[in-house]
Amino acid sequence: MAEPSEGSDQGGGSDKGTGSDQGGGSDQGEGSDQAGASMRGMATLCGLAIVAGVAIGFIGGAFRWCLREADEWRVEMLRWAHELPGPGWLVPVAITATGAALAALIVRQIPLASGSGIQHVEAVSRGESDPPPLLVLPAKFVGGLLSIGSGMILGREGPTVHMGATIGAEAGRRAHLDDDDVRLMQTSVAGAGLAVAFNAPIGGALFVFEEVTKTFRMRTVIPTLLAVAVGVGCSRIIMGDRPDFLVGAVQSPSVALLPVFVVFGLLTGLLGIFYNRVILGLLQLVSRVGRVPGVSKAAIIGAIIGALLAIDPLTAGGGDTLAQKLIGGGSVALPVIAGYLAVRLIAGPLSYASAAPGGLFAPLLAVGALWGVLFVGLADAVVPGVDSSLTVAMALVGMAAFFGAVVRAPITGVVIVIEMTATTSVTVPMIAATAAAVLVAQLAGSPPIYDSLRERMLDAQKPKP
């Protein structure tokens, strides 16, 4: 009896051991399969990111080239209009009104082409909205050329980001990726779109991590970096390899003046809160005029911006020319600076309220530069040691700090300004001022502008009872 029992135990042990070996082999096999699938998935994402990066690089570069040509044409048109006998100022009024109206017609057919598009990219990344269809790409390209090219105070980055998102989403769909990876692709290539718009590769990547996803995940980081690198490289074939703004040597401000920059940042935070409220207030005001068709609203707003162009070309347009004048060392009288700032604080949000395709980033940079120059001019009279030699430095700091206060992406703002100007000598005061600006906006409970715009977009998409 003992022997069979012993044999049975041994046999049972042998069976358990075999089963254990088989189970271990099965677990190892499953783990190996999962690791292989993960590697293949990452390789697919990276390959698609490279292809999509090439597409947004050339398309975004072509978009920027067309806008540059439109800017040059607009300058010639204004010169010609001023030389006309009679009311030549009506020419820019008519052209900007027509451009805005035609852009609004495109938006009426493809509503997603409206405005910046960045809020939609963020909503898709959060799973709150569907990825953009391919039709958004030509709608943003043509609509952006019509609205921004005609002189509206809108930025090129919004359409370029949305075009990048559209290309990324379409690449994911064509590769039959699952929904999560399609969203990942649209987000990664959207960052490449921002990088192309500003020739700022690191800023474009940081925009994805700090503003859109608010996280650093390797599955997002690697495709984003590849899309950004390839996209910017391709766009430079069209636009050239140089910073967006040409800035001379800027002396690093004394550490003793750091408190001045902090105070400037605190005040910039308040200005950012005001600017956000103006944007949302004008959007609400324009939307309440329900009896007037959207195309007519856009035409009226375009006519107002066209009148500003007729008075002074620097009061309208995306703001690159104005920002270049300020940070390039150009001399502008303080009352004129104050006038430009007052006009752009209202006219920029008004342009955005037209719903024509166009972004907020580029106009933000011009407002920030104006505010920095104005601050130096005012502080010069009351604070010893603050003189005109700080004008360019404070303009650069103002660009980053105002961006941070409005968008609430401080690192992205600092890096974008550094890349666009190829200037690092004011990095320390720029960081201090931007941090102070964001702190004020946060403590005041003012939400970031794209959070507010995203919520507004999602509310508008809800079915009405």
Image (cartoon, rainbow, N blue to C red):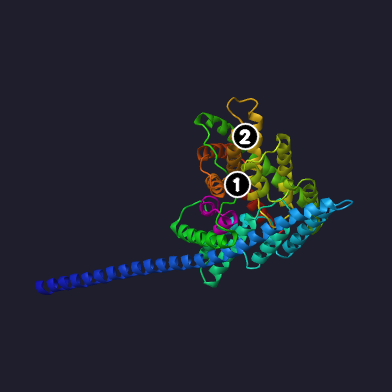
Viewer-proximal residue among 336 and 352: 336
Where is residue 203 drawn, in percent x and y?
Answer: 53, 51
Residue holding disc 2: 267
Viewer-proximal residue among 266 and 421: 421
Q: Amino acid at mark 2?
A: Leu
Q: Is the stretch drawn in magenta largely helix, strand or loop?
A: helix
- Ranked by sequence position, the earlier of labels 2 and 1 is 2
Within-10-Å neighbours for mark 1: few <14, some 14–19, many 20+: many
The secondary element bearing badge 2 is classed as helix
Task: Find residue 8 and report its image quarter.
Answer: bottom left
The residue drawn where x is 67% and y is 38% is 331
Viewer-proximal residue among 107 and 312: 312
Q: Amino acid at mark 1?
A: Val
438 in relation to 381, above or below: below
Name the quarter where the N terminus is drawn: bottom left
Q: How many discs appear?
A: 2
Q: Residue lying furthest right in this view?
A: 86
264 in relation to 123, above or below: above
Task: Find residue 6 and report its image quarter.
Answer: bottom left
Left or right: residue 451 versus residue 336 is left
Where is residue 399 drawn, in percent x and y?
Answer: 60, 43
Where is residue 245 drawn, in percent x and y?
Answer: 60, 49
Residue 461 in sight from this viewpoint: no
The secondary element bearing badge 1 is classed as helix
- Residue 26 is a magenta residue: no
Which mark, residue 407? Answer: 1
The residues tagged by marks 2 and 1 sit, at their Cα atoms, a distance apart of 16 Å
Q: Which residues are magenta?
A: 191-212
Which mark, residue 321? Answer: none
The residue drawn where x is 71% and y is 44% is 344
Viewer-proximal residue among 185 and 148: 148
Within-10-Å neighbours for mark 2: few <14, some 14–19, many 20+: some
